[in-house]
Image: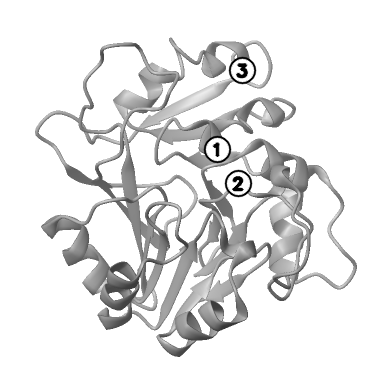
Amino acid sequence: MKIVILRGGPMEHAPRRPSEVVDPSSSDRGVTAIAGDDGRWALINVSAAVAHQLEAEPQAGSDPALRRLHETSARIVLLTDAQIEHVGGLLSLRRGAPIDLYATPAVFEELTTTLPVLPVLQHYCGVHWRVIPVAGDQRAASFRVEGMSSLEFTAVATRLPPPPHAARERDPVVGDSIAIAVRDRLTGQRVFCAPGLRRLGPSEIDWMEQADCLLVDAPGHDPAPTEWMERLARLPARRKVLFAEHQDRASPESRRAWAARGIELAYDGLEITL
C-alpha cells in the first residue's frame, strides 16, 4: 500500500523551512491519495488546490507511482465529510470519466442540497455515488472500493460539527464526518486516516491502536498540544503524521520535540509505503 499526502502546493521531498512564506491557497490539509497492489489510486478528500495540483504536469524524475496518480485523473474519491477544504476540488474534476464518489448519506445530502456540487457535476462528467453505510445507529461499516481489491476499507463515525454551509438549526448526525481505516490484504498493514478529528472516544482510540500508520489532525490552533502529542506518541503505530494547520509557523524546537516522539508533519508529496 502506498500513501501520498497532498496539500495543494508544488510537490516537495522535504518540509518547508519555518522562515518560508506559505501561500494560503496551499494550506488545505486532510487530502491523501492511496494505492493498493494494483496501482490504482483513490483520493481521500479533494481540495480545490489539490485538484489544481493534479492537473499540473508531474516533475521530471517523480516517483512512477506519483506519475500514475496524475495520469489516472483521480476518478475515485472518498469523502470524510462535506467541509469545503475536503470537497472544494470536486468541480475541478468535471472533465473526464464519471467520478466514483464514496460518501455517507449525510455527506451526500449536503452535496446535493446546501452545497449542490453533485447536481452540477451530473451535467459534466457524472457521478456514481457509492454509499458508505454509516448513519443512524450504524457507527462503523466496512465497504469495498471497486478496482482496489487488495485494500479493505472501514468507515468510523467521528464527532465534528457540521460545516458552516450546512442547513441552519440542524443537529449533528452520524455520518457527518468519518475516519477511514484501510487494511492491506496482502501485507496486513493498516492506516487510519482521520482529518478533522477533534475529540478521541473509545472507538477512535481502538482503531488508532491497531494502526501501523496514523494520519490525523492536530486539534485546535496549536499544531500539537502537549497532551495530544504525548497521547499520540504512546500509540504503537510506526508512522504518525499530523495534518497541522499552522505547521509552517512551527519553531525548530517544536519540530525537534515532535520528531523525538516519532511524530511527523504532513507536507506535499510525503510518501509512505506500508
Which percent across, then down, holds residue 5? Answer: 59, 61
Dot 1 and dot 2 residues touching (CB under 8 Å) = yes
- Note whether residue 39 is visible: no
Residue 205's quadrant in the figure? bottom left
Q: Residue furthest right?
A: 60
Q: Are marks 3 and 2 in contact (CB under 8 Å)?
A: no
Q: Is label 1 in a helix, a strand or a loop?
A: helix
Comes first in the chain, label 3 or label 1: 1
- Going from the N terminus, do you reach mark 1 or mark 2 first? 2
Q: Which mark is residue 207?
A: none
Indicate which label's residue lies in the foreground, 3 or 1.
1
Q: Amino acid at mark 3?
A: Leu
| 175 and 35: which is toward the camera | 175
Q: Which residue is mark 1?
A: 85
What distance separates the C-alpha of mark 1 from that of mark 2? 6 Å
The residue singled out by tag 2 in the image is 28
Q: CA distance from mark 3 to mark 2?
A: 22 Å
Left or right of 221: which side holds 8? right
Kind of residue indicated by mark 1: Glu
